Image: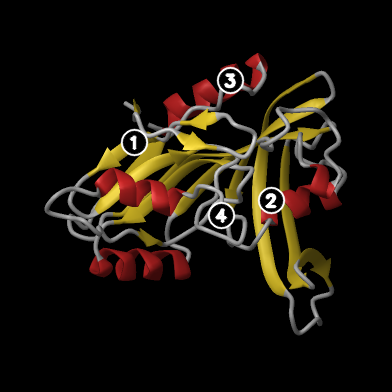
Amino acid sequence: MSILLDHPLCHPNGLAMNVPILHEDAQLLVVCKPGGMLSQADETGDQDLVAWAKAYLRSATRPDPYVGLVHRLDRPASGVMVLAKTRATARELSRQFRERLPTKRYAALVRGETPLLGTCEDYIAKIDRTVRIVAPSDPQGKRAELRYQRLARQDGRSLLDVTLLTGRPHQVRIQLATRGHPLVGDVRYGGSDAFDRRTIALHCYALEVEHPEAQRPIRNQAPLPDTWPAFAHEALASRLRAYE
């Protein structure tokens, strides 16, 4: 069960954010990152997950705890993230993500009615700080692939269960937007629908990695944020039960 901590995070709009803890042991800290929160510090100086984790883990015997960031979620996205509490754990988890071993499942609420099943295959490059779809021959392009299943549809929107087969910056956002289905709230990629002004409708609801010490799969899930519509909550709830 998630535990809401008494460590408020100040967002630029003045709202306080709490970080639910999904799992913790000597090697791992697994949390649900709130939408609108940075994964790591940037030039804005806004609060980030790594700084929050350091504050949470700090104690008299650990004045400067180690926190290893081994993967990221875009700032406006939410969902399950795993942090390493030791350098050895960080190396092992980084290897797993580099070799694309973890299973990552996303809920995405998009504009329009998508096919029931779909696959997106493209080449993505970051050019002048902008993520773009490029030709396969482009030397900066990296292959990006995902597949999805539509779980529900209502009021001109579709709820998708997305499985990432690669992990590229803004991959889900740009691949779906290019096909005419931008994420709700994602104005950067054409999602003009109103959401909550600081997040987009992209949520990592399940993440499975191999525990570095126990050498067994560890799976964590996080339900959708309250800001998502009721039909999305209902549709994903059955998927969460099936994925347990």
Can residue 99 be spotted in the picture?
A: no
Q: Amino acid at mark 4?
A: Gly
Q: Earlier in the sequence, mark 1 or mark 4?
A: 1
The Cα–Cα distance between marks 1 and 3, rounded to whole angstroms, is 19 Å
Distance Cα–Cα, label 4 vs label 2:
26 Å
Judge by depth and name the residue closer to the eye, 134 or 198: 198
Left or right of residue 18: residue 15: right
Q: Position of residue 182 (x, y in %)?
A: 81, 42
Looking at the rendered structure, the kind of residue marked 3 is: His
Q: Secondary structure at mark 1?
A: strand
Q: Quadrant of the N terminus?
A: top left
Q: Which residue is mark 1?
A: 22
Q: Which residue is mark 3?
A: 233
* Residue depth check, mark 1 versus mark 2: number of the one nearer the observer: 1
Most foreground residue, 66 or 15: 15
Q: Is residue 232 visible?
A: yes
Q: Name which quarter of the figure residue 93 lies in.
A: bottom left
Task: Write the residue at 81% across / 82% down.
Answer: 137
Disc number at residue 173? none
Instruction: List the residue tagged with mark 2.
Output: 172
**Residue bearing mark 4:** 45
Q: Residues within 10 Å of mark 4 (few under 14, many from 20)?
A: few
Which sits earlier in the primary sequence, circle 4 or circle 2? 4
- Label whose residue precedes the other's in the sequence (1 or 3): 1
- Cα–Cα span, label 3 and label 4: 33 Å
